Amino acid sequence: MSSGVQSVQRAVALLGAVAERPAGLVDLAGATDLPVSTTARLLSTLVGVDALRRDDDGTYRIGPAVSALGGEAEEREQTIEDVAYPHLVGLATLLDEATGLSVRAGDDTVTVLQVDTPRPVQAQNWEGMRWPLHAGGSGLCVMSTWSAEVLEQYLDEHPDAATVRRRLAEGDPDGVWWTVEDYVEGLTSGAVAVRDRDGAAVAAIYAYGPSYRFPDPARVAEVESALVETAGRVARAWGSQLAGPVSSPEEESR
């Protein structure tokens, strides 16, 4: 096998690994069984031709050159991650904390997108991580949009239904669901549902950071407003792509 063919095969393997799950250099080297030095060289080349993009935290993601391949004659159908990305960037820049997008996967939520900002203390990238629906703000805000029938069916099979009912009763369906150290010790998270035209959650937008600094008590109202507005913008953008405008959470409450 020529070195050129081998390089192409390795590059394709890396693209496949990143498409399956965005990750950093070491993780991608392990996923493709390549030496770290070889992986670093190939990743640099792929970034250089826009096949991949590299986040500030070192996470590699599919780049615009590869994303565009699905739509030469017609536009590639965007995913909710595509739609949400610029809005999460704006939210992360405003709050100066990490932001993310979660979707439901059975009885769990899974983080499908995260945007980080340079801070003295950062948590890990949670993309691909699954959490039980009842175990945090993202899942609770999704559950709060369910019909009574669907919610009762879920709770009938839940071993701690009383606790879940209490937490749902304490939250604001149209507002921010705050959780402290539900996911990880020392982290606080605020989440808002991204709703479809019928008011059901299709995803959750969240921001999180170390509890000692997030949220700043002087900025709680600002943070909550930014979260709700961002969820509304993502809902409208996603809804307009599918089947017309989607009402934002603030519009639904009027």
Image (spheres, grey):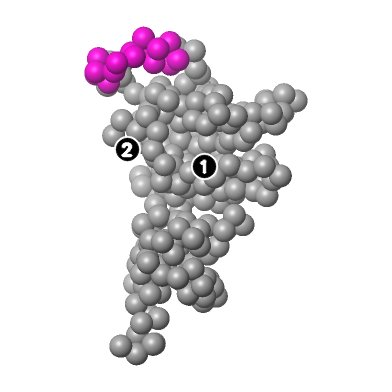
Q: Residue furthest right?
A: 218
Please provide the residue range marked out in magenta. 153-168
Which residue lies at the image location 68% right of the left edge and 49% below the top edge? Answer: 118
Q: Position of residue 140 (x, y in %)?
A: 43, 24
Given residues 226 and 97, the one toward you in this image is 97
- Residue at image position (36%, 69%) is 13
Which residue is disc 1 drawn over? 100
Res 247 visible: no
- Identify the residue at horizontal 49%, vertical 68% (top origin): 36
Question: Whole-percent x and y of residue 14?
Answer: 40, 68
* Magenta-span inclusion, residue 49: no
**Label of residue 105 in the image:** 2
Quarter of the N terminus within the rendering: bottom left
Residue 172 as seen in the image, left or right of residue 108: right
Q: Is residue 182 above or below residue 235?
A: above
The image quadrant of residue 58 is bottom right
Element marked by disc 2? strand
Q: Is residue 47 left or right of residue 197?
A: right
